[in-house]
Image (spheres, rainbow, N blue to C red):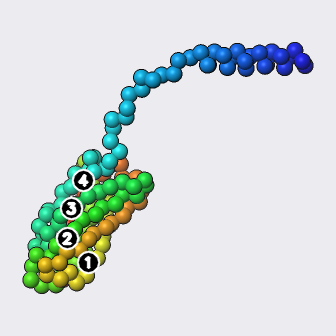
Amino acid sequence: MKKGLQIFLATILLLGVVSCGKKADDTKKPDTTSNDIQDVVEDKTKTTQGDLEFSNIKIDSQGAINVVTAKVKNTGSKTLSFKAVLYMKNSDKRTLGKVDQQIDNLVAGKTADINVQIMGDYTTVNTFEVVVEDLK
């Protein structure tokens, strides 16, 4: 029993000495691939849609949540209500997801913020587009 324990300890000691003698690999190259979804996904939103003007459209990845933000300005002379719909499509132009945000009573000349959060894996999305629907 003692001999087996001695062999076991000698083996561990030998492995420790061998692994300490290995030189650390300091030549690792930095990761140059971008995890920024904005670099991968193309924005297809029309900047002007009727009397509505979109600006500062961004999509950011925050862990498992992707956040689309934008500003929309009512350039017309009437107060408008509408739905801003975010469409996400793959390279085959198939819609993978659709999320909307209702904007009510946007006064002429005023700006509103759009903030749509999407949870899940959207790694196959290569375009997104914000479209105005149900304009009143």
For badge 3, the amino acid type reads Asn
- The mark that comes first in sequence, 4 or 1, is 1
- The mark that comes first in sequence, 2 or 1, is 2
For badge 2, the amino acid type reads Val
Residue holding disc 1: 103
For badge 1, the amino acid type reads Ile
Label 2, secondary structure: give it.
strand
State the CA–CA distance, disc 1 to disc 3: 17 Å
Q: Residues within 10 Å of mark 4 (few under 14, many from 20)?
A: some
When the figure is inspected, residue 79 is found, relative to residue 45, above or below; the finding is below
Residue holding disc 4: 127
State the CA–CA distance, disc 3 to disc 2: 9 Å
Q: Where is residue 17 in the image (x, y as percent from the top left)?
A: 66, 16
Residue 133 visible at all: no
**Pointers 3 and 2 in contact (CB under 8 A)?**
no
Q: Is 64 on the left or on the right of 126, as rendered?
A: right
- The mark that comes first in sequence, 3 or 2, is 3
Which of pointers 1 and 3 indicates the residue nearer the eye? 3
Which of pointers 4 and 1 indicates the residue nearer the eye? 1
For badge 4, the amino acid type reads Thr
State the CA–CA distance, disc 4 to disc 1: 23 Å
Residue holding disc 3: 56
Residue holding disc 2: 72
Residue at 32%, 42% (x, y): give it.
34
